[in-house]
Amino acid sequence: MNTEILGIIFMFLLTVLLAYPLGKYISKVFLGEKTLTDFMAPVERSIYRLCGIDPNEAMDWKQFLKAMLTINLVWLVYAFFLLLYQDKLPLNPDSNPGQTPDLAFNTAISFLVNCDLQHYSGESGVTYLTQLLVVTFLQFVSAATGIACLVALFNGLKEKTTRNLGNFWSIFVKTNTRILLPICIAGAILLAFNGTPASFEGKDSIITLQGDTVLVSRGPAAGMIAIKHVGTNGGGWFGANSAHPLENPNYFTNILEMVMQMVIPVAMIFALGFYIRNKKFAYVIFTVMTVGMLWLLIPTIVSELNGNPAIEKMGIAQATGAMEGKEVRFGPAASAYWSIITTIISTGSVNSMHDSTMPLSGMMQLLGMMVNGFYGGCGVGILNYYLNIIIAVFISGLMVGRTPEFMGHKVEAREVKIAMIVTLFTALLTKGFTALAAYMVAHHPDIAWAVKPSGWLNNPGFHGFSEMLYEYTSANANNGSGFEGLGDNNVFWNVTSGFVLILGRFIPIIGPVAIAGMLANKKYIPEAGGTLRTDSFTFGMMTFAVIIIVTALSYFPPLALGPLAEYFTLKTFEL
Amino acid sequence: MTRKRQIKLFEPALVNAAVRQSFVKLNPRLMVKNPVMFTVELGTLVMLLVVLNQLFTGDATQGALWYNVTVFVILLITLLFANFAEGLAEARGKAQAESLRKTRETTQAKVFSENSNRVHSVPSSQLKKGDVFICEAGDTIPMDGEIIEGIATVDESAITGESAPVIREAGGDKSSVTGGTKVLSDRIVVRVTTSQGETFLDKMIALVEGASRQKTPNEIALTILLAAFTMIFTIVCVSLKPYADYAGTAITIAAFISLFVCLIPTTIGGLLSAIGIAGMDRALGANVIAKSGKSVETAGDVDVLLLDKTGTITIGNRKATQFHPANGADVDSLIESATIASLSDETPEGKSIVELAAVKGYRHPVTIGSQSDFTYGLPNSRIIKFSADTRTSGIDLDGRIIRKGAYDAIRAIVEKNGNPFPADLKAIVEKISANGGTPLVVAENNKALGAIELQDIIKPGITERFERLRKMGVKTVMVTGDNPLTAKYIAERAGVDDFIAEAKPEDKMNYIKQEQASGKLVAMMGDGTNDAPALAQADVGVAMNSGTQAAKEAANMVDLDSDPTKLIEVVEIGKQLLITRGTITTFSIANDVAKYFAIVPALFISSIPALQALNIMDLKTPESAILAAIIFNAIIIPVLIPLALRGVAYKPIGASALLRRNLFIYGLGGIIAPFIGIKLIDMLLGLFI
């Protein structure tokens, strides 16, 4: 087996190996058991005192969501104004301008919702102050919000019958102090030692071998790059994200960043098993998600390693596979692996340009975001998967002749309704807005106000369609990666994707937490002989089928018009 | 046994009625209740407008006229098929009910007027609740009621199919009579207990006819799921228009509507109400009258089943199975004494002793006299009847004093008269008890002779039924008045999971409450008035038709056969109902895979030739591909009607195994079948296009 593939296997195994103990640790943190990080307790207590929080106050699902939504609204307003007036604020050595209102609207939402879709370039669009106090700050709190909401689900599953899903504030604070901060500090130090900048000085200038003077942007980047991955955020310090030599200097940092972004999503699955004392349930979920990942990953690796038939036809040898848009220090296999992981776990950071990947790879990246629950983002991945579980529980419950129940609670009309509303919204946001964009491009290509300064699309044809589809899919999935051929910094893209972002974030959080709260409130039914076990691989298979047939397949028409049309057209070059 | 009212699936008369209904049900006001099929109806209407527009204006932008007309016709047929399924289920239900209703034909009732103290004739249709009527031998009972005076044998075969007459008498647990049954002997005075149109049968008829059919909670949840799928596919289809504009492809209205109709779950949408009605119909076919659809569905979820021992698990009463002589006594004299003491004993136990003796070769020479001759042909005898005080019975005959009874009672008599009680007999008695039997000790002239072993006889086949229930995940509980030792023994032999021994009526109630408190669903069967509170408390209460009015009122189902094991069938009917819905839903959704591959390439092939690669079924032309898909979509509905009406067979193999099985058949089958079906239809269409 070649080294490139071995590198991928190593990265994956290392992630799982670290995620297992981390999952156990996370479960202990939220169960309130003794852990290594108990020295943080005084810090937490002073935060509670300062904010007037009673960390032991019980919250039902409505109170929990109210607290979560309120604080998120505060952060949104705060971030919007800081970005708008960043040029007048300190820590701006490169004299970058303030953002336009539509861009600030998009950027503030984008980081608030853990998406980190960037319609600006880090070097010129933000200042050190906003990089730290808006971008990095939101990267921490948005990840913690997602994890806190997942812990609410854990609490709902753990108790037989309860109204209490835990205290949002306390879970949120602990997520930061006990999980995100320690991992990020360790990661940032390792990154800094490998050459990632960590200074407040402005641009440096170097003279290249050709004798040209080149200005190189810098900044206190290492910390931000750590949380960008640990929190599955993905927004880069530099415009080129982790393809940039200072953001991801070598293969070691590539492994490090890869493991950092994947470790919490995977650990949360194991944490679920420890927390509700049903490890098998966690293993089944892990298996289904891993199968899902492989289903997307393998075709991507194969098509990237095989190279582009159109280039082949020009008589150019592609010994290393498709290299357009890729960094030589990572190669096509590691880039393919990154492109799939970053799309399935909603990070959206990139170490190669997805716009340049082969059409089939692009489709797999799109599918990863459309499903958005194979591991998925910090916390929200399992929440998304949970919706599929509810639908699978309902259909399979009927199939075995018993009123559907999940973990001892009957799944009835109300829960099905919520799960389906969320699914419906996902379909509407992605397909509906792509349709709107396609309509505008087809019928009103000339409305100038909406598309200043960058125009609609840089690539016409199938690929342009893929770019539009990718934009909204990424926004809805809170992923943040992009097909960069899209001229995305204009009023149209900023405003529409801003709305998709915020709805695509909060509806899929509110839905599962509400279902978890309602189910937990119901009478507990002990398991009997006729109960369908949801911690069985048969049920895992059922959930997988629901994901593929209900979610993935409904994207068949747009996928056919975008990546599939491009793929089959490209295939004709092989003849 | 149950007389199944079998009606052929496609009985011509029923089919005719269903065909008529297929058109009547096209009325949008009826259609709107089924969101999936309602959207199909809207699509059909749009196609009609397209066709009309083309006819009048000659507009050719929407494809050839024959093609649009064909699409319109196929969609209309899809609707008719769905309506036909529902109509057929209803017609079957009606036919089923009709056979019961026949018993309801108007008869003359002899109403007893308290004012004038006279009897006058009134048509049964005018009887009111509280009226009192008289029935004599040969009369048909005009209305459901409760006997307030008298005893009679009644032929209930019209309702139960059981030809042997039953005894109904005032007071006690057998006081209820059903309208339409016939009095064979004697005379009874009956008070009407229900108003016209409110008898159980009336309620059931209304349920199967759909008039008062309310959707069950699971049905509501499924309807929501299907409506949401429909909306998702609406988004898929509507968003396709701008995508196509971008790609520079013109898509005809017919193609849009075809894609939409194929993607939405029309198969389950079209069969959903038929499945529900058929479930009620199956219950009625098993001679169970359910008061609501919900109760049938709940039966499928039952975790705990309470069954009375006597009559359900064991045959009626105990039977003598063995004579055990004490040391020194000889077996023949034991048999002889026991038989003499039992000749006049009318209890089933007593009779069984005489029978057992006959089997052993002993027959008492005297002929048994009539019941009124209390000497039973035994001269100079004095019969001692069983009493709760002495706990013995027996006979004094020609100086012989024979007694049989409970061990301690006989022992007391023996020892009081200065005789020793044989030590080995004590051991025999203990052994019988340990084996679940009841020992009856026989003494003659105050000397113990030996013991008779009485055993409960477990009904043949009942153990297998409990095994089946266990596999279904239902816990069975036996309720008995026996002591715990005997109860335990019988419970083990019959294979029930738990038992309530020395049960008093309130024990049942407490047990139900306790199980319910831990989240279980409990079903029970009962007949007596003292069962009524427990029947009401249970999640599924089945009253026997022979039971009291109070029990029937409290229950949510009435078993016309009064068969105590009927609950098992009810549980299976409930499960079948859910399984049928689940599997057809899965099948319907799985079908979409093939339909995507048929229609999507067909839509774009003209503008994006490379997408021909997606046409993996190699369908001839875009038109034939689309037509094949919607034709398949339409004919799958009638193909599945038999499955919907009969129900998917329930196999008690455990939930996970059942899911695997159904997922394999209906999930994988649902993916593969349309690939084959659509290809075949396309090949067939290729002959014409």
Image (spheres, helix red, strand yellow):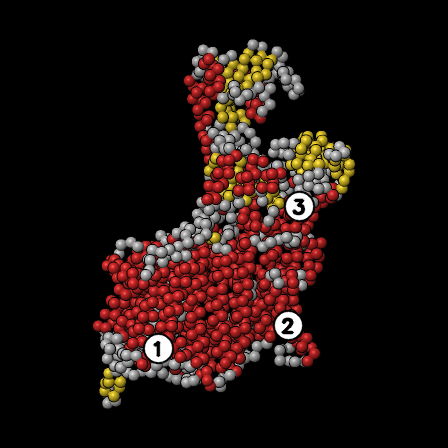
Of the residues shown, which amino acid type is indicated by label 3? Glu
Frontmost of labels 1 and 2 is 1
Local SS, label 2: helix
Residue A543 higher or lower than A441, as above or below: above
Of the residues shown, which amino acid type is indicated by label 2? Met
Residue A41: where, in percent of width, then height? Answer: 26, 59
Frontmost of labels 3 and 1 is 1
Q: Residue furthest bottom?
A: A211
Q: Chain of mark 1?
A: A
Which residue is labeled 1 in the image? A83
Residue A148: where, in percent of width, then height? Answer: 36, 61
Residue A440: where, in percent of width, then height? Answer: 50, 81
Which residue is labeled 3 in the image? B198
Frontmost of labels 3 and 2 is 3
Q: Which mark is residue B47?
A: 2
Q: Residue at x 60, y 38 (%)?
A: B550
Q: Residue at x 30, y 61 (%)?
A: A48
Local SS, label 3: loop
Q: Relative to residue A329, is residue A543 drawn left or right?
A: right
Which quarter of the figure has residue A167?
Answer: bottom left
Q: Chain of mark 2?
A: B
Q: Which mark is residue A507?
A: none
